Amino acid sequence: MANDFNDNNDIDNVNKSSSNTEDKKESGNKDDYEAVCYICRRPESKVGKMIRIPNNICICSDCMQKTFDTINTNGVPYMDMMNISPNMLNLGNLQNDIPKSQKLKKKKPAEDKDEEKNTLDIKNIPSPHIIKGNLDDYIVGQEHAKKVISVAVYNHYKRVATNTMDDIEIEKSNMLMIGPTGSGKTYLVKTLARLLNVPLAITDATSLTEAGYIGDDVESVVSKLLAAAGNDVEKAERGIIFIDEIDKIAKKKNLNNRDVSGESVQQGMLKLLEGSEIEVPVGASSKNAMVPMTTVNTKNILFICGGAFPDLEGIIKTRLNKKSSIGFSADLKDKYDSDPDILQKVTVEDLREFGMIPEFIGRLPIIYALEGLTKDMLIKVLKEPKNAILKQYKKLLLLDEVLLEFDEGALDAIAGKALEKKTGARALRAIIEEFMLDIMYEIPKDENIGKVIITREYIEKRGVPYLEMRGTSQKAFTPMLEQKN
């Protein structure tokens, strides 16, 4: 009995200590965030010290003074305000806590900022060849694009780490990425941000409109980066923003109507790309009275814009064909019709003809194009990257203790079908999901199946896959349809 009593005391002590540590963690997390005024939603760093009233409500001095003025106009004496209960002010029904997505992290003191700058040292930034080597593990081909983006990112974070160099200010290396659909633009940026361990925000330019119209303002791009950084302003100011479908905000050819989602959006993004301090909402995409606001400096944020630019090839061909003339040394007009690398010849003039304004292009100094995926590249995409599609399915079946193999003919057939869809690497997943459906459904039925081999005939719907049963000394392959019968 004495031992049981001691054991119970030990358990109670452990529970108390664990609860104390949890309370400390919660209090520590709360201390990391600023107090926000319940009425105007401005943080404590903007309005000064808050006035705290019951129910964990914080109100800034400006809003409190306005409340006093309102009460005085209704005949309530100023000095009697101290005797008014929260219920009389209708504050008792207010929420106790602000949503976590709208909490703003406190800015670090100057000493902590200096230490943080020291941690972001040039020696800690990976070299361009290391960045490209890591990208090679996940992305097939696109050698030129990977080299350009590796050098640009390396130079950008050198600029962030040093801030200034002998009073020579280094400008930002914003990029414009041009490539057909499915060539790996978004995946390239995702992989880069994961390797560098920096916050990344991916947004779509099609939802952006001019301020005052239905849609997202250009500041919503930065608010998404702030959310990705955990509402930490210092961390967000060193992040990467990828704006996809940038070709959708080109100037419209028809000028009869107001262009609120084209040229106006380009003009609104000029201050973001160049670098300026802007007010962005915290935890929301639009500004309103109930959302806290904070200031973010975009000087050190790297902007990468990407788009397919579907009609750009014709503009490039028209420009190149102007050089053709009559005579023995003239170029043929159909010389560039079958050129697979026509986008590599893009110039600033071509982008202006497409509908991008000169001020916008000038703030994207690095312009490069991605290659369209060929049949050989699609086969490599299937099997070579670390997280290749075939490796994913092999792992799924390996969990059922079944080996999955693809012969060379099957890979060639899958790549051929993907080329016909003209959607790049995105078509591979859809094709594999189609013919793997029956296999993933039938395999768990029979525990005697040890290996599945996918053939060209099965991909082309002229045959069935072959199975190898467990415990066979030789490779006794049987068609799956016979196995099901």
Image (cartoon, grey):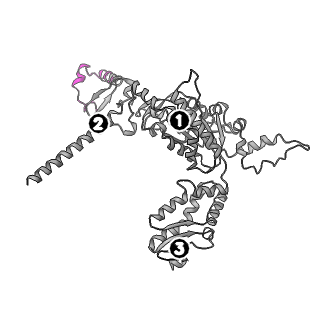
Magenta region includes residue 246: no
Secondary structure state at the residue bearing disc 3 = strand
Q: Is residue 120 left or right of residue 339?
A: left
Determine which quarter of the picture holds residue 283. Answer: top left
217 relative position to 329: left or right:
left
Q: Amino acid at mark 2?
A: Ser
Give 435 or 383, whichever is nearer the viewer.
Answer: 383
* Mark 2 surroundings: few (<14), some (14-19) or many (≥20) residues within 10 A: few
Q: CA distance from mark 1 to mark 3?
A: 56 Å
Q: At 45% across and 75% down in the image, what residue appears?
A: 448
Is label 1 or label 3 in front? 3
* Residue 469 in the image: above or below residue 327: below
Q: Is residue 12 visible in the rendered structure shown here?
A: yes
Quick one: which residue is furthest to the right in this view?
A: 327
Q: Which residue is mark 2?
A: 27
Mark 2 vs mark 3, CA separation in Å: 59 Å
Disc 3 target residue: 467
90 part of magenta stretch: yes
Residue located at (68% from left, 36% from top): 255
Q: Which residues are magenta?
A: 68-92
Mark 2, mark 3: which one is toward the viewer?
3
